[in-house]
Image (tube, helix red, strand yellow):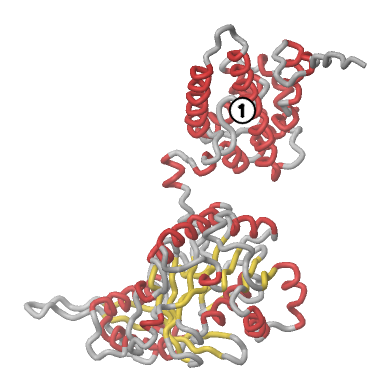
Amino acid sequence: MVQGRATPPDVSSSPWDTGPATLAAAEETLRDVDAERAVLGACMGNRDALDAVRNILGEGSFYRPAHETVWHKLIALHSEGKPTDPIVLADSLRACGDLERVGGAVYMHQLFDAVPSISGAEYYAQIVRDMADLRRLRASAIRTVQLTQEPGADPDAIRSGMETDARTERERALASGQGRLSPHMVDGWRFVSETGAQETPLWGTPEQTLWGSGESLMIVGPPGVGKTTLAHQVILARLGLQETVLDMPVAPSKRVLYLAMDRHKQIARALARSIGPEHESVLRDKLCVWQGPLPATIDKEPELLADLAAAHQADTIVIDSLKDAVSTMVDDAQAVAFHNARMRALRNGVEILELHHQRKATADAPRGQRPTLDRVYGSTWITSGAGSVLFVAGEAGDPAVTIHQLKQVTGEVGPLQVIHDHERGTTTVEPTLDAVTILRAHPSGLTTRDLAAILSRETVPGRSDVEKARRQLERLVKSGLATKAEGAAGGAGGGQQARYQVSHRHLAVS
């Protein structure tokens, strides 16, 4: 039997068909008008939602021109500090002659009622953005197909045009808010006015911050000095099981993810010292623990930290310890890669606490010598990217250690002489070195140099020790715990120094 000729393909069903009917059908699949309505309704009802959404959407994101007009008017009202509710929005649109064109005042109220949940505004906006991206990609593809079908089409010219279109699209996307990097792009005023400086610290006070929001905290020290003991107390406070650590407040967390990569059984035993049966429900609901090595090192998988936090719905990650999370600590390239991963998680709203070690070569440094950042093991980029660095100095197993803040968020904290209770897993500041306690023991008052000599345990304290003592005393005066008497002016000798005394109110309460 003779083989018949193959049947020609049905060109009417080809994916490259650019006929009017095919384009109209494709147009229907690349829009979500309900999501557009939900975005606009959410932004009318909540200014914070508008701030979040404007980082996702850009020019030409809405399929319906009326929705694009309403969106621009919402942005304008918000920028002017005016309300964005349906009444003000309709009045503003009426003033510029656009109200009837976009559906009238009734439609503004329908949009306001169209949002299922304001908390879903960013999700709805992402749907709108994805649809807009697909429409642009489809339009570009259609132009390319049409060019290839023209008589005498030049492939090199078409390829060059495609590359030019791609560059133009990327530049437009990043400038208008459609690109992958756009959520991190803000105008100059927002950058300086929304720094988070007014946010409550995660640990400490605005004047003395041990752990700032959006900035990682690193706890460093040799083995056995209580880094994990200190970290566990901060974690328990984040879980709401205690209010302060080292007499400084700790802000609560929603959920903590603990990466117990370094001897997880020992970590469990250490944490169990502070846990009782009454804590079971909190630990089950708000603490999740990864035991052992990660599936990949963080420097090799820069999205891993953020992905782990999202998968476990955690707003805090504890890395115990850094040496188990990074391929090598001494290579600058790996350190920068880790820092980029750290920043990705921080930008996603995940707070990070890291435990780390000091250099072995400096393990035998003289007791009492103030440590410096170069004593932290690894590349300098490890500490450069951290917000706060605490160094726990002392001997392994010693209950009395000193905590130095080597990198500050606001005012420097310490040095703090602290006592570990290894049986209960708690840490307290040595009361004899508390500034208020010292002032109470000296009724006639102290100068800044006097306090510096006591705190540093040096007969002739250094300039930095005196300055730290002065800042401590001034904070006590500001908070009403101490009073200050200015010294008398003198001649060639420079006069008398100011003296500080514990306030009578605090003395009476004590």
Task: Provide residue 263's location: percent of width, then percent of height.
Answer: 61, 80
Residue under circle 1? Answer: 61
Quadrant of the image for the N terminus?
top right
| Of the pair 368 and 448, the residue shown nearer to us | 368
Q: List the single residue furthest toward the right.
A: 1
Left/right of residue 421 with respect to residue 333 in the rendered view: right
Amino acid type shown at disc 1: Ser
Instruction: Residue at 48% x, 22% y: name it.
Output: 160
What is the quadrant of residue 381 in the picture?
A: bottom left
Residue 409 visible from this viewpoint? no
Instruction: Residue at 63% x, 55% y: name it.
Output: 307
What is the quadrant of residue 3 in the picture?
A: top right
Left/right of residue 120 with respect to residue 202 in the rendered view: right
Residue 331 visible from this viewpoint? yes
Instruction: Residue at 74% x, 42% y: name it.
Output: 117
Left/right of residue 197 with respect to residue 283 in the rendered view: left
Q: Secondary structure at mark 1?
A: loop
| Of the pair 505 and 291, the residue shown nearer to us | 291
